[in-house]
Amino acid sequence: MTGRMKTLGFLLTSLLFAGCALVPPYRAHSNLEARAKGIRTVVLLPPRAEVFQLDTGGTSEKIDEWSAHANENIAAAIQTELQGRVGLLLKLLPEDSMREEAKSNLEETHALFDAVNTSIILHTYSPPSPPESIFEEKIKDFDYSLGSEVKDLRIGEADSLILVRGVDHIWTEGRKALQVFGVILGIGAGVGTGAVVIPVLGGGTTLNLALIDPHNGSILWYKPIAKGGGYDFRDPASVNSLVKELFKDFPIGKEK
Amino acid sequence: MKTAAIVSCLALLCGCAPYVMVGGKYTAGPENFEVDLPQGWRKHELRFDQHPASRVMLEELNKRRDPAGDIVRLTRDGLLLQQIIIGRTGIDKELPHTKRKLSKGMLPQEVAEVIIDNIRSNPNISNQNVLENSPARLSGYTGFKLIYSYQTKEGLRIKGACYGAVVGDWYYYVLYEAPERYYFTKDYQVFEQVKDTFKILKADTT
Amino acid sequence: MSMPIKNRIGLAFLILLALNACATTSLSPFGKEGLLSLEEDEKRLWIRSEEEQKKLHNSGYLYEDSALLSFISNVTERLIPEEIKGRVSIQTRVIKNPHVNAFTFPNGRIYIHTGFLAKMENEAQLATVLAHEMTHFINRHTIQQVRRVRGTASFLGTLQVIAAPAGVYGLAPLLLGAVGVMAAVSGYSKELETEADRVGFDLLVKAGYDPAEAVKLIEHVQKHAEEEKIEEPFLFGSHPYLQDRKGNYVQLLQSEYGGKGGDKGAERFTRMIHPILLDNAAMDLSMGRFNSAKDAIDRFLQNEPGSAKGHYYLGEFHRKRGQESDAQTAEKLYLLAVQHDPSYADPHKGLGLLYLKWGQKEKARESLERYLSFAPHAEDKAYIEQYLQEIANR
């Protein structure tokens, strides 16, 4: 179930590529280069992907089995991606065996990430934000944090954390048919009644990644991707393709 | 992209951008106060912020506290990550979550009590805690200082600090809210400095 | 040659109806097979419910009085039909909220507000509400309602997010997510609510409670809302909803259950909810619902006339309401509280602040010093010390 802030973050991310962007699709902390040299171990926080079914009536319902499957696919794809990089050791934080305090810490980290994610997109990405809402100084000096409390999410003395969030929408057959007939209905209703009918279909896929310095919670590197359709978190090949795109320009570890 | 850049420049030039870089003395004559705004912060102009995504964000913020009396709203990283707010409301104005009212003869402690009741009665937030409630001065007038915290529906813990005072027919406030984790501490000193420069121009105005 | 517009629209309708394969909306109540009959979309609804309940339980809004919860648990148990006892779990929890409301999640968790308990007069009235809510669970009304909403949503694709806590229901934005809001605010269809009335009544009578109390409860809540001009934002307190319940209950009494009689349980109920009255009054005072607060405080004092706390709360009612001569009445009540318990700190503060505002410095000083002597670590000590300093300086 998505909160309003998570929904807003998804909406903003999905509008990212409505226009063409001339600035890099990722954001990097000014300390990244210095910090990146020392990063050998990455802890992947349990990915948080939610997969929703969108039906004909526009009702959106989270499907837990699909979401669990999506998380497995994303974790596997990231493992493959990072294992293909020299000098990097990836560890997975196992959510099932986490202590209560760690689970609570993770929840608070995600809650803050929702606010940070929305702020990053609202103020450093145009589109979707209008240019007047952009804080140029935040692009030049990208500085956001999830708090030093994240150090307690490390395994051992790992020197970085990766947080991944994703949302996917799977259309029912009825909704796919609606897309086909949507334009026809719109025109038909307009001709018959003079009213303008705009079917609101929604949906899409987003995936956001943050590389975090566990010592102070700084986000060292951040990248959002968004697709209008044609991807499916339940399909490993589809996820592999998305993760490959997500990790393009990833600053840690050389590709083999 | 070129068109967008031109539009952006025009918006900034005409002062009709939703976020404007500020710094230095700010005088709100009709609202009877002046204050030094911190360098490098941005002032949010609600009337120019019509983007749909902003509207959703602002609706969420409005559920946490009523912005009706806000005159100046400042941020550095985005309103969800910190806000310094300066404002005033008429003491006869209804508060959003309580039918209790402020009144002229109230002791600062009683004014603080009504503000706390309003926070406690807000159904959109949970786990409200008052961490500090003590007498304080705002622009030389006796008032109160509150430090409080609450949790949003999404589970984000927010911390707030508020200096308030009733002067004449108005309740003046200088307020700071930010996520408790990292962001509250980050700019708390800036907030205290802003509060120290806050000055009510004339006492007892209507 | 292209198809005429109206034929294309008709064809689209037919295709959409064919493709919109919705599950049947009617379901058998939980029976001997218990939870084995849960359907797939129902299982997902239970998971959503558990997520919402987790937030609710971490919100600080649950009323944790073990004696009261045990009492309500016994009433709940008494109502559960024999054939499902032990096969499904039904639990009732109390929420700290002064508004009238009770609601059920599809996984058998019933929630009732302290504000509703404070309005009830006896155990039979509590049982009426629990039986109604229990029926929503046993008869699986939530999943039926969800399927109904899904099945009738506009084919033009008006976006309705069923599982997001969007607060789009207007009247009362809540901490609850969409499942809880449906239960607590928008409610079920008229048909399902009537079923909950009818089956709930049956449970009530089988458990030995007096069904006539059902109508009395509704009338009492209605009278309170009308007299106090209170707008209740939740479903159970809303006027149309109460009218429907009353109509159904009156009809059931007349047709099937007239003259039945039964257990009212007034005395044990009054004893159990006694502490809630002042706690609820405090919330009502914070919200400025003064008459509702006074009702509860008066009821408390009726049961415990010698209570210092009760008199102090009544004094606070007058102070916070702040109408003409309220301050003078508050003084009398604080003095009465002190009379009943001289070491109870708060009334001394109440007196001190009144005297301070009236310019009676010496009396203010005495009362405030007394307050600090009984509450040396009071949270508002800084204020009191400042007042004492100001008095000394004058």
Image (cartoon, coloured by chain):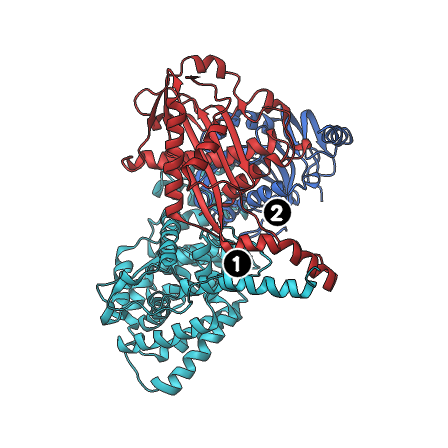
Q: Is residue A98 visible?
A: yes
**Residue A119 position by quadrant:** top right
Reading the image, the residue beneath label 2 is: B104
Vertical position of residue A87 compared to residue A172: above or below: above
The chain containing the residue under callout 2 comes to B
Residue B3 appears at what percent x and percent y?
75, 31
Any idea which chain is the cyan one in this picture?
C
Which numbered disc, 1 or 2, marks the residue closer to the eye?
Answer: 2
Determine the CA span between mark 1 and mark 2: 16 Å
Vertical position of residue C36 compared to residue B162: above or below: below
Q: Nearer the viewer, residue B118 or C341?
A: B118
Vertical position of residue A256 compared to residue C8: above or below: above
Q: In the shown orientation, is residue C300 left or right of residue C20? A: left
Q: In the shown orientation, is residue C266 left or right of residue B183? A: left
Q: Are labels 1 and 2 assigned to the same chain?
A: no
Query: Where residue B206 is drawn, which disc sits there?
Result: none
Residue A121 appears at what percent x and percent y?
57, 33
Any idea which chain is the red one in this picture?
A
**Residue C280 position by quadrant:** bottom left
Residue at 39 percent of width and 36 percent of height: A73
Residue B27 appears at what percent x and percent y?
72, 31
Residue at 69 percent of width and 25 percent of height: B25
Q: Neighbour class for label 1 at 10 Å: few (<14), some, many (≥20)? A: some
Reading the image, the residue beneath label 1 is: C326
Amino acid marked by disc 1: Asp
Asked if the residue under mark 2 is in contact with the one under mark 1, i.e. CB atoms within 8 Å, the reply is no
Q: Which color is chain B depicted in?
A: blue
**Quarter of the image where the C terminus of chain A is located:** top left
Q: In the shown orientation, is residue B202 left or right of residue C333? A: right
The chain containing the residue under callout 1 comes to C
Amino acid marked by disc 2: Lys
